[in-house]
Image (cartoon, grey):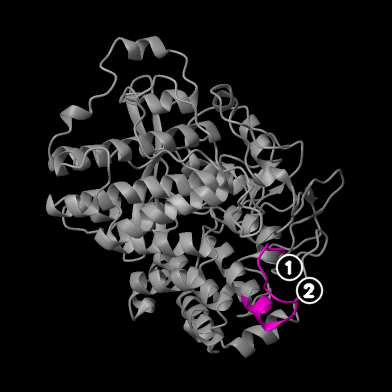
Amino acid sequence: MLKMNNLLKSTIAVIALVGLTACDKFLDKMPDNRAEINSPEKIRALLTSAYSTGTYLYFSEYMSDNVDNMGDDNPGTNRSVDQFYTWADVTEVGNDSPKSFWESGYEAINHANQALEAIEKLAGCEGELSVSAIEQAGLTAEMAEALLCRAYNHFMLVNFFSLNYNANTSDKDLGVPYIDRVPVELNPKYDRGTVAEVYEKIDQDLRIALRYVSDSYYLVPKYHFNVKAAYAFACRFYLFYEKWDLAAEYATKCLGSQPAQVLRNWQYRNGLEKDMDVKSNDYIKSSYDANLMLVTAYTGFGYYMGYPGITKYSHNSFLNFTEMHYAQNIWGNTETGWRNVYSWFWEAPEWYSGSTFDQLVYWKIPYLFEYTDPVARVGYAHAVYPAFTTDETLLNRAEAYIMLGRYDEAAADLDTWTHNLIKPQNFSETLTPEYIHEFYKNVEYWTPEVPSIKKHLHPAFSIGGEGELRESMLQCVLGFKRMENAAQGLRWLDVKRYGIEITRRTLEPDPAAGQYDAAFKILKGDVDVLRVDDPRRAMQIPPDIQTAGIAPNPR
């Protein structure tokens, strides 16, 4: 069931951006209630709505290369997932749809803008974001949170609905509307601008916010843009913005001098009961240093990844044993490597070889259901998920170090991540640039028939030649990030940034395969390839949004 519209979408901006048709209902009410937001307490309360309740998790994971088609006769799918998997223009709607993600993102942005205008009014600088006046009024922490929310929501929207940022073409590529004011017109028209312009405006908001972000008034800091979460966001943003030095700087501010002490405790998780509720609820604990900021959303993603609810497009054992956690890697081969790793997911007693069901189930994001009518058993699916973690931030810093040519520091971060994951008795080597290069230069590149952990990289920025040290280091960090971010929707963003091509393949049961071998073999049928220059890398603007006047992406 769709989420309740219990806020009445108090914003004219949302009407314009999402193409709602019942505009007359808004004309019967006071068009904006900003005059009532007249105290710091009310501003803080409003800012709790500046975090989007829509999420990218569902469609992003199925657009990535983390899943395969397990056979067209497999009934475990729906029209939405069919469209996600094939990078089609999505027509379906619901809480996990691109339309919901767009609407919720701009609704959150509007609340951030309402808060900023209230701050300006209280500071006596109405109509202008005067930092000095806001500083004198003692409202800089509130200003910082609002700017961070505005910047982050635009950042996520532009990274899904536009092509990825690159210094060569982003001054021409279509962006998304950057809304920095609550509109006063009934039906304002917005230009998408360019990706470069959106990034410039995010940068402006972020630089101000980072000077003033504070944990001072948060009752539960992990559900807000606390200081460390702000630094983690800055690291990710500047990494994507190709400002490697700033990405490394803010990652260091986030992680401190002993990053190994703030990473997720995989050894502890390995000993937890193999139960979805136990493991998924443990993953999102706000008390863990690894979780920097937690976000709530209306989504069934925990069900799709945890039960599992989708079986046709699956993160299957063949994919995992050839490309990801249990594949031949720097810490071991396929015979022993998987035994070296602390448990990432629930391992079923059988892998269901010889059937059309084969899925490794991640228990990261919980499936939370709110019953509005327990008798009728109807309600709303929720999830809580970490928007930022220390583990991702550490790997982002390693990537930034690689691009800066600081290979020893990058290797040290990769070594820290590895030894947090690997059982210490099974891998005692220290990762150095030389060790990493020697391993990866001898790994064959991925093909559909003979997959591996190493894929051709085609970013717009220079990484040197294939087989060189920098490329080997990047192969390592991107592979680690793929494992770290599995079932969290972030792999798709690296696919876009590095021009990684995806070949869709269909698998069929291989009765001759062993339990921990390739339980499926590559099958027949047409394949679709997402090329480097494929315009489908920018998700299509939802049809209702196009109707409201937002230009579609080229196809």
The circle drawn on residue 444 is: 2
Location of residue 451 in the rendering, given as x and y in whole percent from the top left corner: 76, 64
Q: In the picture, which quadrant includes the C terminus? A: top right
Amino acid residing under circle 1: Ser
Measuring 35% from the left and 47% from the top, which residue is drawn there?
Answer: 149
> Which is more toward the observer, 378 or 162?
162
Residue 465 is a magenta residue: yes
Above or below, 237 relative to 261 = above
Disc 1 residue crowd, few under 14, some 14–19, many 20+, Cα 10 Å: many
Task: Using the image as rendered, state which of residue 429 and residue 153 is in the foreground.
Answer: 153
Residue designated by label 1: 452
472 over 343 or under it: above or below: below
- Residue at image coords 60%, 45%: 162
Q: Looking at the picture, how far across and down is residue 39, in whole percent?
A: 12, 38
Count how many numbered circles sit on residues in the image: 2
Within 10 Å of the Cα at label 2, are there few (<14), some (14-19), or many (20+) other Cα atoms? Answer: few
Residue type at tag 2:
Glu
Residue at left offset 31%, top offset 40%: 112
Query: From which residue to which does the magenta span run?
Result: 458-473
Percent x, y for residue 253? 34, 72
Question: Magenta includes 319?
Answer: no
Circles 1, 2 touching at the beta carbon (< 8 Å): yes
* Upstream in sequence: badge 1 or badge 2: 2
> Element under label 2?
loop
Answer left or right for 316 relative to 481. Answer: right
Q: Is 255 or 452 nearer to us in this picture? A: 255
Residue 282 visible, this angle: no
